[in-house]
Amino acid sequence: MDSENGKAIFHARIIVNNQVVYTNEDGFAPVIQNAANFEVSAFGYQKRKVSGFNSPIKLTPTFKNIEEVKIVSVDIKKLFNDIKKNYKKRYYNGPSLYDVIFKEKRSDNDELCFLVIAESKLWSKNNHYNYKDGISKNYDKILQMQLNNVKYLKNTKSDSIFSPGSNEFAHEYMGNYFFSFELGRTLNHINSINSKYSGRMISEEGDEQLITFKIESGTGIELNGELKYNKTDKVITYFEVHYLQTGYPPIRRRMAGVEYDYQLGDATLIFDFYKKDGMYLPALTRFSGDKYSAVYLGKKHERKFSREIIYNTFEKSSREGLSQKVDFTKSIWENVPVKAEKEDAILLSAEEQAFINEK
């Protein structure tokens, strides 16, 4: 929790016994009571080393203005280009196997209607998105997933108005798993005609800088974001970007012969990394959206959604991949899960537990 106001901290990262876990919306995370010497961190807060199990854990905000009258500008285009150019050198670039928690949920008109949480294996060939394989639809050469244990799966209703048309898999769906893909997409907005952008360092402690940025894309989309930058290793260790799209013109769609306007909402992507044995590894990826809406047959539909992956454990792998894997060209939940027993590595929030308990 926040040491100043007592509020729960969502997505606080805890590294204990070579395992990564995160707090849920209520600030809770699964940590065994004999855990010792573990690290707790969250964006905007000071890292804390904890010698022994303790609850609650209070984190102190780190935001300290460098000097109120001094604005420290950052050339984010130069920074992003440098990281993109050297991505394979600065982030782990080899075949990897992760134990992950896959979590997805959707709400229609502010009511939770879909929730799935699954323990899975995730295999990546080199931890970055390969455009050549993506465009050629060689998805298994980029990423593979094996469902081990679907812990929760509940769907109370399905509003097809949000997913009309072809079921053809878009390479952007897989691209959202990778920071390298988002880095390229952000640079495309910066490089678009008539774009405007700015960056500002708001805090610095040791090697770590906290930087905020704004981009007005030539496409009419506004991006606001913040990041942690390690100036010694020259890597972004945390990246969060908000796509403000509600001002974008509505998209005309058709369903059952009836035309309607579909309005893009606001989207957020988060990528979190940690350093282990000199390598920067993914800890969390999250893609979420809010205020996506449509008026169809006189009724307004508004959707909110999120999909996140928590990378609990890591090990170096071979290039063969997984023996049993999901088909990414279909709904993941059409696949039969491979049963495997594992300790819980995630906790439901109060809202999620109430939804699961509903009859």
Image (cartoon, helix red, strand yellow):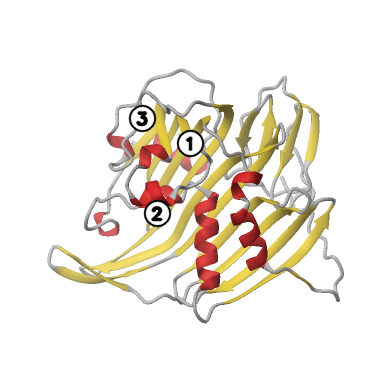
Residue beneath label 3, please?
325
Judge left or right: residue 14 versus residue 37.
left
| Structural distance between the alpha carbons of marks 3 and 2 | 20 Å
Instruction: Identify the residue at horizontal 55%, vertical 65% (top origin).
Output: 187
Horizontal and vertical percent position of residue 59: 77, 45
Between residue 277 and residue 273, name the one nearer to us.
277
The answer to the question of whether label 3 and label 2 lie on touching residues, with beta carbons closer than 8 A, is no
> Label 2 sits on what residue type?
Glu
Mark 2 crowdedness (10 Å alpha carbons): few <14, some 14-19, many ≥20 = few
| Structural distance between the alpha carbons of marks 2 and 1 | 16 Å
Instruction: Identify the residue at horizontal 27%, vertical 49% (top origin).
Output: 158
> Label 3 sits on what residue type?
Lys
Instruction: Identify the residue at horizontal 64%, vertical 55% (top origin).
Output: 83
Horizontal and vertical percent position of residue 24: 58, 41
Q: Quadrant of residue 93?
A: top right
Q: Quadrant of residue 303?
A: bottom left
Residue beneath label 1, please?
124
Image vertical order of residue 155 relative to residue 86, above or below: above
Q: Earlier in the sequence, mark 3 or mark 2?
A: 2
Q: Earlier in the sequence, mark 2 or mark 1?
A: 1
Image vertical order of residue 53 relative to residue 140, above or below: above
> Label 1 sits on what residue type?
Ser
Between residue 157 and residue 337, name the one nearer to us.
337
Instruction: Identify the residue at horizontal 30%, vertical 49% (top origin).
Output: 169
Q: Secondary structure at mark 3?
A: loop
The answer to the question of whether label 2 and label 1 lie on touching residues, with beta carbons closer than 8 A, is no
Between residue 221 and residue 195, name the one nearer to us.
195
Mark 1 crowdedness (10 Å alpha carbons): few <14, some 14-19, many ≥20 = many
Query: Which quadrant of the figure contains the C terminus?
Result: top left
Instruction: Find residue 172 and name its label.
Output: 2
Mark 3 crowdedness (10 Å alpha carbons): few <14, some 14-19, many ≥20 = many
